[in-house]
Amino acid sequence: MPETENNKNNSPMFPAKTKGHKFRSWFLGILLLAGVIAAVTHLGEIEHFAKLAREARPMWLLVALLLQFGTYVCTALVWKRALHYVNIRQSFFSFVPLAFAKLFADQALPSGGASGISFFIAALKRRGVPTDLCMAMMLVSLVAYYVAYLIVALASLALLWFYHAIHIWILLLVGLFCLVAVAIPASALMLQHWSKRAIPKLLTRLPNVRDLLQGFTQAPKHLLRNRSLVVTSILLYVAVFLLDAATLWIMLLAIGQDVSFLAAFPSFVVSSIIATLSPIPLGIGIFEASSTGMLSALGIPVEAALTATLLLRGFTLWLPMLPGLWLARRELR
């Protein structure tokens, strides 16, 4: 339920209007600087993507663009439905650019998703959404995302078993990820249940982290108890994974590889898991090597596997950077 104006301006994330404005200014500056640095330091990879894209079949590239746009639509629908359940009316089309901008925030400042959460809350507050509802939306999104991730991870194991391409290292890796996928949303739910007592004392000494965690403890619980909303959000995030995997499959078709989607799907998911668990920002190099190795293990030539993977990264990582940078600036100014 909406807060009073006084409560909104004295929320844990932004205790006063002046502080909130100062936070947005600093955060935007850091975000834009990080985005420029990321683009410059990986200019060679961007140029390589552009060269490969020129040589690929144009029709398939258009299909890949549509698939990637679909991922932003699905993400926007998660947020739109959450606001709908608390009777806050926002245009659906305004959330699609926000999805681009949040992806840019996650990529520009790799921080386990914390930068994207901070950006998202700042952007929603600018639209007049109370802080407690912002945090409730993020809780629903967090839980739904990791449940969806868990579903596609287990589905990938089943497919690899079917293709006789499963190895002990894959089982150990997915097992470790399953622990992480359960621990993260479980920790967020514990914060809700036990309130401030669940926050480790060490974290309470870090102001930004403390404010974020306290925001989770004060988020209303009725959104998480809405089964229809949670299930729909999970399905939408599963659709995001399917669309990303379909983009890898389309990239293989674009370079003349007649392969099944059922081979591209586990390759994408396992590579994403490796990149997620990796300490390397954005999984640069780790994702590419993992995807190439997985596709090769499923019978796709190494050269074709690497080319398709680089094309995929271009569509999922580098192409959205420029519009994401501009949209992030527009959302926070």
Image: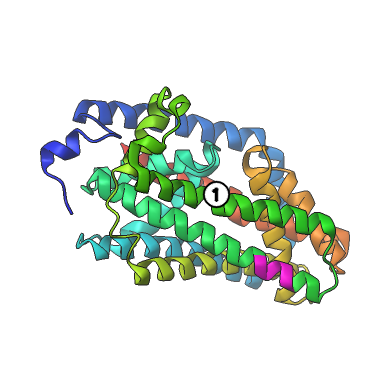
Magenta region: 154-158
Q: Residue at x 46, y 34 (%)?
A: 31
**Which quadrant, please, contains the N terminus?**
bottom left
Give the camera-side residue of 35 and 71.
71
In the image, what residue occupies the spot 46% across and 56% down? Answer: 143
Name the residue at 26% across, 26% down: 19
Q: Is residue 155 magenta?
A: yes
* Amino acid identity at mark 1: Ala
Q: x, y (%) of residue 184?
A: 52, 48
Residue 149 located left or right of residue 252: left
Q: Position of residue 66 (x, y in %)?
A: 53, 68
The residue under label 1 is 183
Residue 7 higher or lower than 150, as above or below:
above
Q: Quick one: which residue is furthest to the top in this view?
A: 205
In the image, is residue 162 above or below residue 203? below
Q: Horizontally, is 89 left or right of 169 in the view?
A: left
Is residue 257 in view from this perspective?
no
